[in-house]
Amino acid sequence: MSTTLSPKPKRKPSQRRPRAGSFAPLYPSQEAHDSALNSIRAFLKSHTAYDAFPVSFRLIVLDTKLNVKKALQCLLLNGVVSAPLWNSDKSKFAGMLTVLDIIHLIQYYYRTASYDYAAADVETFRLESLRGLSTSAIPTSNFTHQSLDIEKELGVDQPPLLREHPSSSLYDAARLLIQTHARRLPLLDHDTETGHEVIASVLTQYRLLKFISINCHKEIQQLHIPLRRLKIGTYVANLRHEVPEGQNPYYPIATASLNTPVFDVVHMFSERSISAVPIIDEEGIVVNLYETVDVITLVRLGAYQSLDLKISEALNQRSPDFPGVVICTSSDSLGTLLQLIKMRRVHRLVVVEGEEEERRGGKKGRLLGIITLSDVLQYVIGAASIGEGIEPPEEDNKTANSEMQQRRQTRP
């Protein structure tokens, strides 16, 4: 497994990254791998979502009457990227606000309004208007607009209004996350006196995988099979004829360069419902990663015009606390990945060509794929049966790689 730290924002946006060594044996055992997965799944079936709650945590809940700008400031000041919404009129849960909602809103304004208009409107635009939750027109200082369904206007999917009870098994909660392609699951209980809903917590993909990595140490040590053989992640098409005409050579992965305008990447975020895009040079070497939170930082400062900046310029405004890009190679193991999640907060890994690909004519550090937490969770929980979906060894990789490119990039 490889980890990489991105450069300081004021310096060049590229950097060299240290690697964390893998503990995979020379001849990984399929039987031990399958047995470990069965044990992890049994462990999740025997524990509830409540068990995964951290010892101490803050829960931020936003009223749907709050305007978007204040809600955004609240998220950033508390270092979170999502929060449950609460309808105070009906005393009930009203969905989740995520950074992707803000990305959709930015794209909507960018398409339909001037900078000045957007800056004025966002001061009064309420959270209840994001998905048509309000029932009446909302007056503002400049105009009156009806509640808008932003996702419908942009032609993107609306996030599901899912929830689960804290006493539900972690396995069931994970299955619900997979089935709905969601990254987080609100956990709701009911007040015994009033009968009203109570938001207890939010279970994220990261929290669930970290719970596994902390409590299933012995099982993780048996997960030695390489990530690509397990078909975990999305990989670039190997053959030129597999790339649709007009698409970039790293299809189906969305990519950008340091000269790409920020708004072009915003469009990728919104259209594909993804939260990060690899930044590559002319040879395909991964030099950085641009994330939805980077865009939100610009918007929070009121820098709507900054969306026309190039990525290289926008990276100079990134917080110095940015943790860096996490990379791996396709030969790293699932066990190593889960150990990494135990040690640090990871939301995705950029797969690059390593020594193995270099020996076959590749270029070390060149973009090879993306692995999201959704990909990892889907495999661990068992979207495929035990022993199924395992890519054949090296000699059969050509056929398997052709099938791999058909997978679409999933939500990080």
Image (cartoon, rainbow, N blue to C red):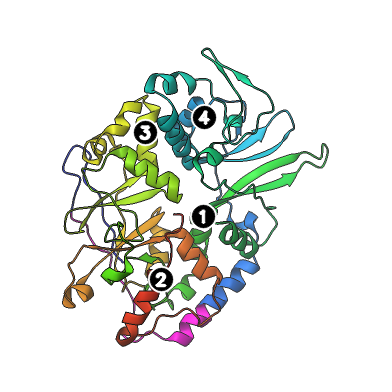
x then y, percent, for residue 278: 30, 53
**Which one is in front in this view, the residue at disc 3 or the one at disc 1?**
3
- Give the SS element for disc 2: helix
Q: Taken as a whole, is the magenta stretch helix, strand or loop?
A: loop
Picture quarter with the N terminus = bottom left
Tag 2: amino acid: Leu
x then y, percent, for residue 9: 23, 39
- Mark 4 lies on residue: 71
Quadrant of residue 322 in the image?
Answer: top left
- Give the SS element for disc 4: helix
**Which one is in front in this view, the residue at disc 4 or the one at disc 1?**
4
The mark nearer the N terminus, 3 or 2, is 3
* Mark 3 surroundings: few (<14), some (14-19) or many (≥20) residues within 10 A: some
| Residue displayed at 74% across by 41% down | 197
**Which one is in front in this view, the residue at disc 3 or the one at disc 2?**
3
* Mark 2 surroundings: few (<14), some (14-19) or many (≥20) residues within 10 A: many
Q: Identify whether 228 is placed above or below 29.
A: above
- Mark 3 lies on residue: 297
x then y, percent, for residue 210: 48, 59
- Say if the magenta span includes residue 20: yes
| Residue displayed at 47% across by 75% down | 218
Picture quarter with the C terminus = bottom left
In the image shown, does 262 or 242 lie closer to the viewer? 242
Q: Identify whether 69 is placed above or below 193.
A: above
Q: Is residue 248 left or right of residue 49?
A: left
Tag 4: amino acid: Ala
